[in-house]
Image (cartoon, grey):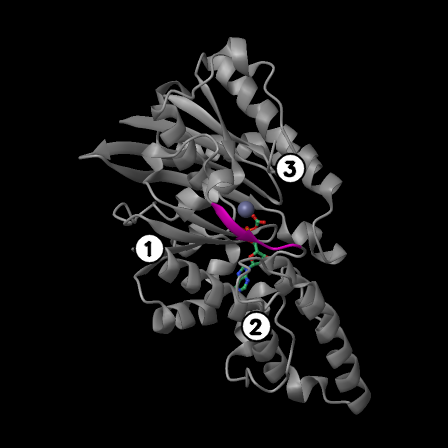
Amino acid sequence: MSLILGIETSCDECSASVLLHERKAGVDHFLPLSVSTYTQIELHQPFGGVVPEVASRNHLEQVQPVILDALTKAKVEVEDVDAIAVTNRPGLIGALLVGVTAAKALAYATNKPLVPVHHLEGHLMSAFIGNPNIQFPAVFLMVSGGHTHIHYIEEPPMSWKRDVLKQSLFGRSIDDAAGEAFDKTAKILGFPYPGGKWIDENAKGGDPKAFDLPRGLKNKDSLDFSFSGLKTAVMLQYQTLEKLGKTEEMKKDLCASLQEAILDPLIKKTIRLAKDKRAKTIVIVGGVAANSRLRERFASESPVPVFYPDLKYCTDNAAMIAAAGAVRFAQGAGLSAQDYLTLNAFAIAES
Ligand code: KG4
Ligand code: ZN
């Protein structure tokens, strides 16, 4: 059993969490005792997207209050934790550096081991918080604001090697991520950032077949995605509707149609890989996993049980970072001061 303090500052959420990790009968159980998140969404909204420097500066103001809040809510002192886990890749470099520096300072001052965590491993792990019995082999669909990946993973987290993300990757977006496609098309339609939830809400009651929008990389064999063509098609369609004065009248239909164009390839390719590999489960993680139509369609189309993280663990949060850190810590990946004092942050996933 171990108590982990997780810290996440890779993008526009400044988050800390205290999480209890227990391994019972060979199964990992994660119990978040607290999650404290300061979201910068309102700060970036006027710009229509995340402004990296604004993000870094705000993390610098929020990171210590957020950590203190997480410890207070969990009713533990920092001395009580067994290790500190921090996202050190991938993400906005200035934003990552704030979290990594805060974690290093705290680990050094309290003489605790530090566990560097890959943000995407955190997203994969988010599904296990509250769902300890996910069966393997499993197909994971990771759909966030920055990434769209399909992974096929044969073993539970305790057996994951260091390069699990790379070795299990079967498909990815070659341009925009699914969340980015939601956000960019939502911006064209005049919705605030981040637009995914607005498209989701406004698509309800709309006709998903009203507009014939492109599905990228329809090629049967490819498990990759492409969403950049959709963005252009939506823009042209919206301009036509503007000329006809019909943007309001057709808004629901356009939202439903573009949502279907994003979801179609995600759902079809995930289910195809699950069938090909005879996976026992499908696991959907990342911000877009909150989409209600995606959940409705997987529920009716998937041949195997589908698992999701609780909604609060779909978007960026430190509980998933603490969970990923806990598993790596149990594997012996905790660094001592000698090693973590020179630990760096990396903007790209492959570092
Ligand atoms: O996982 P996340 O916090 O981002 C990254 O780590 O990059 O997810 C944020 C993304 C945004 O693109 C947002 O629009 C999308 O998740 N999102 C949704 C919904 N809720 C959030 N997309 C579609 N439907 C939703 N209900
Ligand atoms: Zn994320």
Return the residue found at the far right. Answer: 243
Labelled pair 3, 2 in contact (Cβ < 8 Å) = no
The answer to whether residue 217 is left or right of residue 168 is right
Which residue appears at 41% of the width and 45% of the height? 126
The vertical placement of 144 against 192, above or below, is above
Image quadrant for the N terminus?
top left
Residue 307 is at least partly visible in this image: yes
Mark 1 or mark 3, whichever is nearer to me: 1
Amino acid type of the residue tagged 3 in the rendering: Ile
Q: Name the residue under label 1.
A: 279
Residue 173 forms part of the magenta stretch: yes
Q: Which amino acid does label 2 sit on?
A: Gln
Q: Which of marks 1 and 2 is nearer the N terminus?
A: 2
- Assess whether residue 259 is covered by the magenta stretch: no
Q: Name the residue under label 2.
A: 259
Instruction: Please name the residue shown 58% across and 30% down the image.
Output: 99
Q: Which amino acid does the dot numbered 1 rest on?
A: Ala
The residue indicated by pointer 3 is: 348
319 vs 206: above or below: above
Q: Find the distance from the CA under tag 1 to the CA under tag 3.
A: 29 Å
**Disc 2 within 8 angstroms of ligand 1 (CB):** yes
Magenta stretch in the rendered image: 169-174
* N-term mark: 1 or 3: 1
**10 Å neighbourhood of mark 1: few (<14), some, or many (≥20)?**
many
